[in-house]
Amino acid sequence: MTATLIWILVGLVAIGLYLSWTAGRLDRLHARIDAARAALDAQLLRRASVTQELATSGVLDPAASIVLYEAAHAARQAEEEQREVAESELSQALRAVFGETQQVEVVRQVPGGEEAAGELAQAVRRVPMARRFHNDAVRAARALRRHRKVRWFRLAGHAPFPMAFEMDDEPPTALADRPTT
Amino acid sequence: MRIGIVCPYSWDVPGGVQFHIRDLAEHLIGLGHEVSVLAPADDDTPLPPYVVSAGRAVPVPYNGSVARLNFGFLSAARVRRWLHDGTFDVIHIHEPTSPSLGLLACWAAQGPIVATFHTSNPRSRAMVAAYSILQAALEKISARIAVSEYARRTLVEHLGGDAVVIPNGVDVDFFARAKPKPEWQGDTIGFIGRIDEPRKGLPVLMKALPKILAERPQTRLLVAGRGDEKEAVESLPAEMRSRVEFLGMISDEDKARFLRSIDLYVAPNTGGESFGIILVEAMSAGAPVLAADLDAFAQVLDQGSAGELFANEDADALATAAVRLLADPERRAGLRERGSAHVRRFDWSTVGADILSVYETVTDGAAAVATDERTGLRARFGLARD
């Protein structure tokens, strides 16, 4: 009788330890998502700022300036629900303006243009990176949260179910002359 | 930035991953970053100042060949000490799925971790069995890098998730500036790789050689690499054996001069390649490339526009293409030109900037790397209450 009790107790402790370890894993994943999301926000903001600077600098023709300014402004002011759409539209605007190599050359030629073009190229390169890292973390957390042990024992607590950030982040070809995927 | 790089394979054994890590470390140091590389090495081998030894690697059969790996209690302790002493802003683990230092570092560290996946092995049984253990360690990686679109696809299929593609780097100018060697010039076909490793494809080239020599008897085949030379030419008719010259292992400088000198570089590899750095090196040196149409090679050669492709393991197709190219100097000049322009994206200046972008993306606002102290039970229950 006591032997059975002891075995049950050992089993319970083992299960407890395992659940505690799983909770730790989940906690770490949520922290990783938060960090990845902060990095993604920083990159998106950087891209919008550089675009806005370029649009107001008078380097580009007025039509292109207005298109870029509008898109960058909308991306920066967008509400959380509209964010993905606004950022995608900024990507499209950038692709429309910087589709040709000549346009990038024009920017490079003016004083300070070299840096501006470099910053923009860096920004459009880093947004897809940050987004991929974020969505990778989201996927890992989702896979773990869908598991029975996590659902039955409510190991995720009150943390919201993680959502991927879906947007069109294809960089303009003239700014990214390298394999982009 | 303080960067820690983990190399899974023995530093004293030459290999693609080791060279990549060496070049990356030196590139980053050149840019003014502090870099420390943790690598398995015998205690008495001379190491560059930025390499920290993690002890001797043990040869064990793994994944179809004998690999020299580090595991066990001592190695784990060394990894922890390195992490603790280094106080890195970011650590960059190479091949985190190989049961060696990479996986140990993944277990022991927390904070911004970047990982590069080099191989594109088909799913192995061990990987399936170890999946849940691996997953717990791989979850810690904040950013994954795959060396090619092909490697990325394998990674997504086997482990889920996603990765950014950053190719391996090459010092393009080192190859572009090398001086050609006259004795390696004049109707020469080049091959670099292990002679006795069938996957490198020398047997395919040997099968194609009689056809090439029948059309162009003045052609010479230059082979650089380790292995049994007699065995390699056994399949050739005796009178043709003199058209094959073996150079043995060659130094990096000679490799550059070799690639500058030859008229055609042939890469008949039959599989197991996830990138194809040698093609990039050949193109950097301005050698026209003819390669098997493996996924990885096709990508490096821009689907055939920067170099020609032939059907994998088809010796006849290889011979036909080689004869055509050798007889057509204009086509070769065109390939040279396109190849040289194409390889710029593989230069360390581009690749290094991309890798630094990844580092900066994951360290933005994150704490430094530390050893992963397991959370105490009490703290965890405290956490569970709120």
Image (spheres, grey):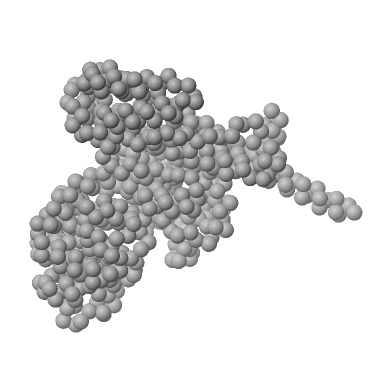
Is B293 or B381 nearer to us in this picture?
A: B293
Q: Position of residue B135 (x, y in %)?
A: 55, 48
Q: Residue A82 location in percent, x, y?
A: 46, 25
Q: Is residue B88 left or right of residue A54?
A: right
Q: Quadrant of residue B91?
A: top left
Mark yes or no: residue B262 visible.
yes
Residues B36 and B165: in front is: B165
Q: Quadrant of the N terminus of chain A?
A: bottom right
Q: How many marks?
A: 0
In percent of width and height, residue A154 lies at 69, 37
Quick one: which residue is furthest to the right in this view? A1
Residue pictured at 73% horizontal, 48% vertical: A14
Q: Is residue B183 left or right of residue B369?
A: left
- Picture layout, residue B248 above or below residue B79: below
User: Where B206 sits versus B75, above or below?
Assistant: below
Q: Is residue B107 above or below residue B198?
A: above
Q: Position of residue B231 (x, y in %)?
A: 29, 77
Identified at 40% across, 37% down, the residue is A129
Residue drawn at the location 66% of the way across and 33% of the way down = A157
- What residue do we see at 15% from left, 74% from top? B213
